[in-house]
Amino acid sequence: MGTTVVRALESAATGEKIIKTHGYSRLFIKEGYRFKFIDGLITNFHLPRSSLLMLVAALVGRKNLLKLYQIAIKERFRFFSFGDGMLIF
């Protein structure tokens, strides 16, 4: 799943269960967030300073994310919506 699904699941999560819900999510996932339901995601390499990048950093840590991006730049991965993806867990 990607960042949008992660946010939706985490918004509906109560521990290890998902509750039936509807409407908008006000959840903003950033470093320090304790994930309730997910333990990994598939995502693209996101724009700097984006909320999506912050969500990924919340999962793997800022330092680890910076290392991943350094590798991606060195290997000439494609970034943004139609770029290369990564599995993070």
Image (spheres, grey):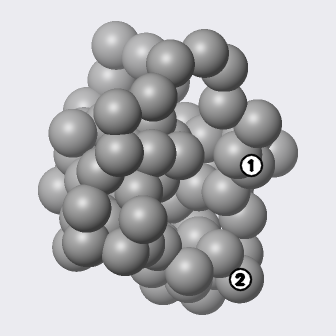
25 left or right of 76?
right
77 left or right of 42?
right
Above or below for 69 versus 64:
above
At label 2, the amino acid type is Gly
Residue 49 placement: quadrant: top right
Q: In this figure, which residue is indicated by the disc labeled 1?
A: 28
Above or below for 80 versus 49:
above
Q: Is residue 45 visible?
A: no
Decide: few, some or many residues near mark 1? Use Cα within 10 Å; few <14, some 14-19, many ≥20. Answer: few
Q: In this figure, which residue is indicated by the disc labeled 2?
A: 32
Check disc 1 and report its element: helix, strand or loop. loop
Residue depicted at x 34% and y 13%: 82
At label 1, the amino acid type is Phe
Residue depicted at x 56% and y 80%: 34
Decide: few, some or many residues near mark 2? Use Cα within 10 Å; few <14, some 14-19, many ≥20. Answer: few
Task: Compare residues 77 and 60 and report the one nearer the observer.
Answer: 60
Residue 71 screen position, x and y as percent: 36, 66
Q: Quadrant of the N terminus?
A: top left
